[in-house]
Image (cartoon, rainbow, N blue to C red):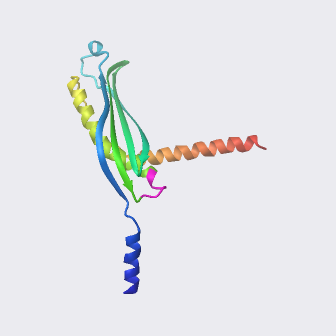
């Protein structure tokens, strides 16, 4: 009985980790169709490329501002059919996360919240531009985050090996 009370008291002392979305907004959006008159109307499948980037900053007291940028480029041969870029920002209140957990939250959980907004805006803009594009598939931000960590680790090891060789 006393052990159970100690576990409950310990659990009460630990702050539960929470992420609260305070505000999501469209920061920037652009659509260009630079070569629409020069495109082949044969119905050939265009090449569509997606690129992602994000940035975040702590604005104080556990509040973080995250901006997710999604760029979609469609080419037909060597001509750009359209270029669509959308940036969505969000303010997230993070409480109870350890310092080790914060990068994961900012690079995985927050973009997971923002991406559907970007995807919807891109779909609307591409459609309004007179183009058809299949829906953008969900992005596995956890895999992207782990890949970036792995690349950073490999760079550090390579730099360490280079500087270790010079110091001898």
Q: Quadrant of residue 85?
A: top left
Any part of residue 137 in sight:
no
Residue that extends furthest to the right in the rendered view of this protein: 168
Image height of 101 relative to 15, above or below: above
- Seen at 40% across and 77% down, the residue is 7
- Depth check: give the residue in front, 51 or 49: 51
- Seen at 31% across and 26% down, the residue is 30
Prevailing secondary structure of the magenta residues: loop
For the record, the magenta segment spans 97-102
Q: Position of residue 123 (x, y in %)?
A: 24, 32
Q: Quadrant of residue 66?
A: top left
Q: Position of residue 141 (x, y in %)?
A: 39, 46
- Depth check: give the residue in front, 25 or 149: 25
- Seen at 70% across and 42% down, the residue is 163
Q: Quadrant of residue 84?
A: top left
Specify the quadrant that holds the N terminus. bottom left
Q: Position of residue 155 (x, y in %)?
A: 59, 42
- Depth check: give the residue in front, 6 or 29: 6
Any part of residue 57 in sight:
yes
Image height of 39 relative to 154, above or below: above
Q: Position of residue 112 (x, y in %)?
A: 33, 46
Magenta stretch holds residue 4: no
Magenta stretch holds residue 101: yes
Q: So how many labels did they put on this image?
A: 0
Image side of residue 168 versus residue 145, left or right: right
Residue that extends furthest to the front in the rendered view of this protein: 61
Image height of 35 relative to 158, above or below: above
Residue that extends furthest to the bottom in the rendered view of this protein: 1
Residue that extends furthest to the top in the rendered view of this protein: 37
- Seen at 62% across and 46% down, the residue is 157
Specify the quadrant that holds the C terminus. top right
């Amino acid at each position: 009985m006393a052990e159970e009370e100690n576990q409950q008291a310990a659990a009460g002392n630990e702050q539960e980790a929470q992420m609260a979305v305070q505000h999501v907004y469209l920061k920037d959006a652009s659509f260009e169709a630079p070569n629409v008159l020069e495109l082949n109307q044969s119905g050939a499948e265009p090449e569509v490329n997606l690129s992602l980037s994000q940035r975040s900053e702590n604005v104080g007291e556990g509040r973080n501002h995250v901006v997710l940028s999604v760029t979609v480029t469609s080419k037909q041969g060597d001509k750009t059919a359209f270029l669509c870029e959308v940036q969505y920002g969000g303010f997230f209140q993070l409480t109870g996360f350890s310092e080790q957990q914060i990068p994961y939250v900012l690079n995985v959980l927050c973009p997971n919240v923002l991406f559907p907004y970007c995807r919807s805006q891109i779909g609307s803009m591409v459609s309004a531009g007179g183009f058809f594009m299949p829906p953008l598939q969900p992005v596995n931000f956890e895999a992207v985050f782990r890949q970036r960590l792995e690349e950073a680790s490999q760079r550090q090891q390579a730099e360490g090996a280079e500087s270790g060789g010079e110091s001898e």
